[in-house]
Image (spheres, grey):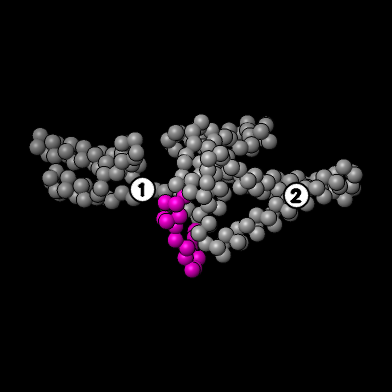
Amino acid sequence: MPLSNVQEPPESVLDNLVAECDDVAFWLNFKKAAPMLFCALMENNQQIKQVRDMSFMEELLKVRSMMGLMATKVEKNDASIDIIEYSMATQMLENKLSVLKALNTTVEGDSDERMTLNIQGTGKAIRIDLTKLKEAVSFLDNTVGERSQTAADLQTTVEEIDITDISEQDYVKKVVAAIGEVKKTPNKLLHKDTFIRIFKYTGDFAKLRSRDIKEKA
């Protein structure tokens, strides 16, 4: 679905808040496939692999212990229970539990060389050659800078071409240079950036030609 068709939810979603906050099928891929793939990539680094395994066991034991202790206090109707705090803690533990469950998932026929992941919400699956994937992964001895993506990062930059005192031939030459490589999606459609640039320059070319026709009239 094109991003342009994605709309903000109406205020009525608050009438059924809990249900509306529940995960849609495809979103589950971010919670299930992502941790599984990340863990597979760590297999070639023994140091990080050891940290990964320790982290998994620590979180598993901690989540089980905390859920058991919380359940016991609830069953005893303990007056010290903070409902809001327990609700927030339960949500965080459920998030951790979903990751732990994903990491404990296996598919018949998979091995150290192959991983198969169901694409939730599509009825399809992907099969990954882990040997090739590991060859494509390099471990760095330092971290890299990160920043949150902004709206400006998603905007397509379009070079302005002055159509004042320029011939059609010269304008076309500048447009070709400004558009650069014509990129297409796997479905053979124009890539967003290419489409926006062509659309912009086509409109400006129409203005240029209209001006020339008026001048000759």
Number of marks in the image?
A: 2
Identify the element where label 1 is drawn.
loop
Q: Observer-nearest residue: 217 or 107?
A: 107
Q: Observer-nearest residue: 92 or 79?
A: 92
Residue 131 image offset from top left, x and y in percent:
44, 52
The range drawn in magenta is 130-147
Question: Which residue is rendered at x = 48% and y = 46% of the image?
Answer: 114
Q: Is residue 164 magenta?
A: no
| Residue beneath disc 2 | 64
Identify the element where label 2 is drawn.
helix
**Residue closest to the far bottom:** 141
Classified by dominant secondary structure, the portion drawn in magenta counts as loop
Q: Mark 2 belongs to which amino acid?
A: Arg
Q: Observer-nearest residue: 75 or 32?
A: 32
Question: Which residue is rendered at x = 52% and y = 46% of the image?
Answer: 111
Q: Mark 1 belongs to which amino acid?
A: Thr
